Image: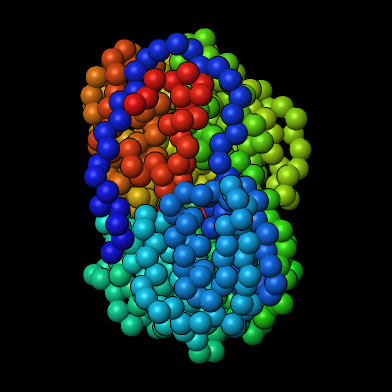
Amino acid sequence: MSSHSATPQPLIARRGASLAGRLRVPGDKSISHRSLIFGLLSAGETAISGLLEGEDVLRTADAARALGADVERLGEGRWRVRGVGIGGLSRPAGVLDFGNAGTGSRLMMGVVGGHPITATFDGDASLRKRPMRRILDPLVKMGARVVSEAEGGRCPITLEGARETVPIVYETPVASAQIKSAVLLAGLNAPGRTTVVENEASRDHTERMLRHFGAEVSVEPHGIHGRRITVVGHPELTARPVVVPADPSSAAFPLVAALIVPGSDIVLEGVMMNPLRTGLVTTLMEMGADIAVLDRREEGGEDVADLRVRAGTLKGIDVPAERAPSMIDEYPILAVAAAFAEGETVMRGLHELRVKESDRLEAVLAGLRAAGVDAEIAGDDLIVRGGRVPGGGTAATHLDHRIAMSFLVLGLASEKPMQVDDGTMIATSFPTFVPLMHGLGADIG
Ligand SMILES: O=C(O)C1=C[C@@H](OP(=O)(O)O)[C@@H](O)[C@H](O)C1
Ligand SMILES: C=C(OP(=O)(O)O)C(=O)O
């Protein structure tokens, strides 16, 4: 099992001066994982710039090496992957340890599931609690076999990939880019067409990258909010450069900090604005946030923009369930914004938050209550009654980076300081969070 047994490191955030300055958050985690995986599956050399060098992504780099790729770091965020091509994977010598990373482990299960090799997947105590049946079920339909698994389809899991991968049509039971991607990646080594049907559109980075590397992909609307995505198997993927844009899920933390710390005025540079990732910005604008979207442009095949964010008054709103896929990782920090908003914010349809790095519904509720905020869970909904935020407590982070960063941001504007019990997991997705926040003038230590 992986080594996230690092000594817990409590951190504390205090109210101080207003936040000011410009910053660029690190590369998008979803695209970073995928760039390494597509590099592995391509013939030739994939040059990546702006790669997120967070622990989750570094685990995917290790796994790509274990499966046969030559992966080299050339400089900050600059990586080169010499791939093996579809069908060329080798059996890894040891366990593939994905640490805290749901995305890395699940996408690689898709890769292995579609190849005639066997691999064991494991991770830290958080990853070992996460449901993997949702990935294994379609892969078994495609011909893979689960050799062993911990109770309830948990890691450690040994997966024997299909000898002859069967193309399928698969309707995902929940909107999940990880399930969709695992099936499409396995489908790359299947003869014919593999189709994923989703009733709510989830982030489309896999589809975009499949096209970028030369696969034939079609995307059709399905129902009101859904999509039907088909990939044609056995393409020749050719190495292509990947430029990773700044991660909107990381930008969310300084963004909300600037909204709630009085007098703040910051600019977040080059934030990815893929419409399947911008639910938080939409929601905060509905709450009255002062966010100006400047210089919209394209970088590396994605829309990006600079976001100028100024502090101001927020009001509570009702956030519809169908928006959840476009902001699924942003609910903890949205709940913090809601704590500072006037009135009630209702966030609907959050069942998937229960199976992230922690049970985020419970972790957010407990953290808000530790900060003296009035909040409750009703079914799958989270209700936050905003206004006064006393702070003065400790949030338990349960090996969850987003819980840690969310409650540190809360502490920048609460009456008394706010502590989190462990900041070490922040390194999984946003290793430069604390120094970048210091650069804006935040008091976190
Ligand atoms: O595909 C991806 O890169 C991701 C998909 C989402 O998970 P689900 O597929 O479980 O919704 C998200 O929460 C995760 O942080 C990244
Ligand atoms: C859910 C997340 O990541 P993963 O599923 O990759 O662990 C996240 O980063 O918030």
Above or below, 354 relative to 1: above
Q: Is 348 on the left or on the right of 301, as rendered?
A: left
Q: Is 375 on the left or on the right of 68, as rendered?
A: left
The answer to whether residue 414 shows anywhere in this view is: yes
Q: How many marks?
A: 0
Q: Quadrant of residue 230?
A: bottom right
Q: Is 344 on the left or on the right of 237, as rendered?
A: left
Task: Give the quadrant of the N terminus.
Answer: bottom left
Above or below, 427 relative to 17: below
The residue at the far bottom in this view is 163
Where residue 36 appears, as percent x and y from the top left, is: 57, 62
The answer to whether residue 222 shows anywhere in this view is: no
Where residue 184 appears, as percent x and y from the top left, is: 58, 70
Where residue 135 appears, as percent x and y from the top left, is: 43, 68
Describe the colour scheme in one phrase.
rainbow
Residue at the image position 45 percent from the left and 41 percent from the top: 431
Where residue 192 appears, as percent x and y from the top left, is: 66, 82
Task: Give the quadrant of the C terminus.
Answer: top left
| Residue toward you, 436 or 317 | 436
Above or below, 251 relative to 91: above
Above or below, 174 relative to 149: above
Residue at the image position 34 percent from the left and 23 percent from the top: 13
Q: Quadrant of residue 72?
A: bottom right
Residue at the image position 24 percent from the left and 45 percent from the top: 7
Residue at the image position 47 percent from the left and 37 percent from the top: 432
